[in-house]
Image: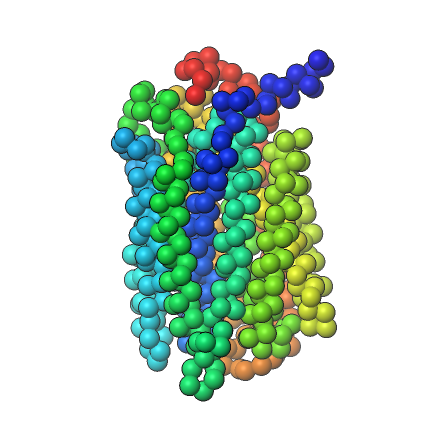
Amino acid sequence: MNASTLHMAQLAPTATERLPLRQKIGFGLGSILDMWGHWLYASLAFQVFNIFLGVAPGLISTVQAIKIFIDAGSDALFGWLSDNTRTRYGRRRPFILVGGVLAGIGLPLMFAVGKGWTDTQYFIFMLVSMIIYVPVMSCFNMPWVSLGAEMTPDYHERTTVMAVRNAIQKGPELAMFFAAQFTTLSIFNDASGKPDILRGAQTYCAILGAIMVAVSIAIFLMVRERYYEKLVSRTQTHIPLADTLWRTLRCKPFRTVLTMSLAYSIGTAMVGALGYYATVYYVCKGDVVLAAKWNTAMGVSGMAFGFAGIPSFWWIARRFGKRTGLATVLTLAICAFLGDWWLYDPERPYLQLFACGFVAFTGAGFWTLYAATIGDVVDYDESQTGQRREGSFSACQSWISKVGIALGVGASGWILQFTGFDATKEGAQAPEAIFWIRILLSGIPVIGLVLALIAILRFPLTEARMLEIRGKLEATRGKV
């Protein structure tokens, strides 16, 4: 056996480290709540509150930014709580069950508004509903994300767990793309025959909320907490709340992946709304119903390309390591966003399918490999501190990435206003507005992606380094 073969054999998961498919699927189901609980509202907010109800886009993006800052604080709290919880059901699963059920019940209430309110009334409602709903989602999300970093000690099996999760995530992603078309179905038309987008959104969120309740119960029954049962419940002491942020940020490899995530999140979030407006007002000339149909088709394309991206980048990471896999992802993502300038074309609207598809292809790879690196960082930290602090790391990375998203989302509405977009105009927008929507949609993400690429090339936790760390940990506290 040569050195390369021996190295691969050492890194291959043993029978006890390879998780049963049932547990991988159980963990992956959490992506349904993660997607809908965090992003469905954001994806519908501009369509419902701006296009249908006429609320100024700057107010909507301001609420979204405030929401994510609240989210960051509540994530830190629930990450810390789940790290320190000890129950017969584990330290993560009770939070997953309670938070998931409440999140499903609360989702449709986020659009429980009436028509004819003032901008101030809509703004107050959006803000208050966020203050209530955000901690509920954190109650589910932080323990669930933390669980992903402790399901297996194996370097490659962690990537497989995240690959299964992201494959399952394509289902709820498709539901999000279909949301816009659902709200414009003829069954929701008002007396004048125009779509009642508000009523459509309320109905759709009620359906998805019921699914979220059922899924949270299934996750509770299907997953197990490997490290809790074999290590944490017997040996680990209380973790101070301050460690959730400050001691966690002292971990150098963690700061590297945070920098990458922050750059990626800001760059892509700043143009999150522009793609929809490019479809509606550039490709479809202001036809909201036609644009909704194309949006659904783009969702199908994104799901298909995303499915292809998961095994593609999983293979690259398994063959060359996660750092190389992430560098490849980011390089291709730069190409994908640059291509948006040509792929949003009113003469050839079908090219939008590739615009969405290429971004989804790279996005699936990025989030699969990024999530898989967190378990490696936690192992490194355990080798330095002697504690398993998945909740602290999950909360801290959530806090930082959501600050990035908050900055991006908070800027998105103002960026839209900067382009000269006018929601009171029906049909086509001014040529200058269309030009700026297109150029910013392609240009802004590239800046963030280049910075993310520079960061990941400095990430020190290679396969060989992780094999060394694991050997030292198991020699000290045994296998899990």
Q: Give residue 196's position: percent from left, percent from top.
A: 43, 77
- Please indicate, yes or no, whether residue 438 appears anywhere in the rendered image: yes
As drawn, is 232 to the left or to the right of 363? left
Q: Give residue 157's position: percent from left, percent from top.
A: 54, 30
The residue closer to the viewer here, 77 or 446, is 77
Which residue sits furthest bottom?
192
As drawn, is 464 to the left or to the right of 3? left
The residue closer to the viewer here, 278 or 438, is 278
Q: Residue at x 69, y 52 (%)?
A: 335
Q: Residue at x 39, y 43 (%)?
A: 218
Q: Residue at x 37, y 22 (%)?
A: 230
As drawn, is 14 to the left or to the right of 203? right
- Please indicate, yes or no, whether residue 80 appears anywhere in the rendered image: no
Task: Classify 31 as above or below 8.
Answer: below
Color scheme of the displayed model: rainbow
The residue closer to the viewer here, 190 or 467, is 190
Task: Classify 110 as above or below 256.
Answer: below
Q: Give residue 254's position: percent from left, percent from top.
A: 49, 34
Q: Residue at x 58, y 69 (%)?
A: 293
As drawn, is 416 to the left or to the right of 79? right
Q: Give residue 462's position: percent from left, percent from top.
A: 59, 27
The residue closer to the viewer here, 418 or 341, is 341
Dividing the image into 4 quarters, which one contains the C terminus? top left
Give the number of marks. Answer: 0
Dividing the image into 4 quarters, which one contains the N terminus? top right
Task: Classify 282 as above or below 169.
Answer: below
The quarter holding residue 348 reads: bottom right
